[in-house]
Image (cartoon, rainbow, N blue to C red):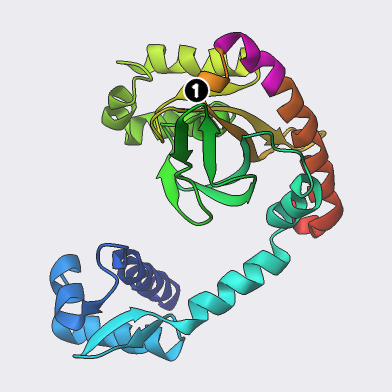
Amino acid sequence: MNKEKEAGSSLSRALEILALFTIDAPVLTAEDIASRLGYTRSTAYRYIKELSAAGLIAATTGAAYSLGPRIVELERMLALTDPLYRAGAAVLDGQECDNNALLLHNLYQDKVLCIYKVGPDVLQHGNQHVVILRARGIPFSLFQGAASLAMLAYLSQHRIRQTYLRNEQAIKQAGLGQNWDEFRHKMSRIRRMGYATSRGQITPMVMGVAVPILLPGDQRLIGSLASAHLSAAMPPENEAACAQGLHALAEKLAQEYLSIAPRGQTQ
């Protein structure tokens, strides 16, 4: 194995270790890491040492490890420099949210992240009070929720096909089609409409309307913008009007993104 391949392999293994840390498993021992990833103890300790030196994990009590302070530093840097986040702050702050929330999302791998939110944490309609289950940094499925579907449908045809091949069972379970043709037609329908909707998929009694955020010119997808409402307060006949307002905001977000992003990030 040449040095470039060794470096790539080492990075992949280090990232595999970071991916083990979750809400349910915030602290791991070297033995946990070795057994879950099939590493020898010496291999696990070698990568733990490297991650610790970088500040990406930190020792806790009892020879265990948690995520490290470098993660906090990177989060701070991201909030100050991410062009989509900064565009969200510039465009969405001050928007009137009449018992709804505006949610800005980004995509990585087959996950969708809410990166910016404007509006209340609790929606109310009559006697109903419902907490919105979306917050910055929480990953969601690419196959459930309006914000996810608004991005999924606007991926390149090649990526949509590859996504289907990797996730055929999850796509079936999400009700997006029992085969490739059904799935492809559902994605085409979302593109024709220009927006996606969902009801109760992420939070019971809450519905969402979402649109893609596309850069002018090449129409490259950079995220999605969703509006969350109590289902009872947003009848289906009002969804198109809501989407129209979101499209106007999405255009402003795309323009603001272009004004902020270094040239290399827009290509």
Residue 155: percent from left, percent from top: 57, 32
In the image, taking residue 59 as reference, residue 221 lies left or right, namely right
Give the residue drawn at x 53%, y 34%. 124
User: Which image quadrant is residue 67 in?
Assistant: bottom left
Residue farthest along the right direction in this orientation? 259
User: Which image quadrant is residue 83 in?
Assistant: bottom right
State the SS at label 1.
Answer: helix
In the image, taking residue 238 as reference, residue 199 lies left or right, namely left
Give the residue drawn at x 29%, y 23%. 172
In the image, taking residue 8 as reference, residue 218 lies left or right, namely right
User: Which image quadrant is residue 35 in?
Assistant: bottom left
Residue 136: percent from left, percent from top: 53, 55
In the image, taking residue 183 as reference, residue 103 lies left or right, namely right
- Would residue 218 be visible to someone looking at this image? no
Q: Give the range drawn in magenta.
A: 236-242
Q: How many tags in the picture?
A: 1
Q: Dot 1, how many residues are within 10 Å of its Cα: few (below 14), some (14-19), or many (20+)? A: some
Residue 131, compared with residue 242, is above or below; it is below
- Would residue 28 be visible to someone looking at this image? yes
Along the line of sight, which residue is nearer the eye, 210 or 150? 210
Q: Give the main secondary structure, helix, strand or loop, of the magenta stretch.
A: helix
Along the line of sight, which residue is nearer the eye, 163 or 73? 73
Give the residue drawn at x 53%, y 37%. 123
Which residue is denoted by mark 1 in the rendering? 231
Q: Callout 1, which amino acid?
A: Ser
Residue 104: percent from left, percent from top: 63, 44
Residue 135: percent from left, percent from top: 51, 52
Q: Does the magenta stretch include residue 143?
A: no
Where's the N terminus, which quadrant?
bottom left
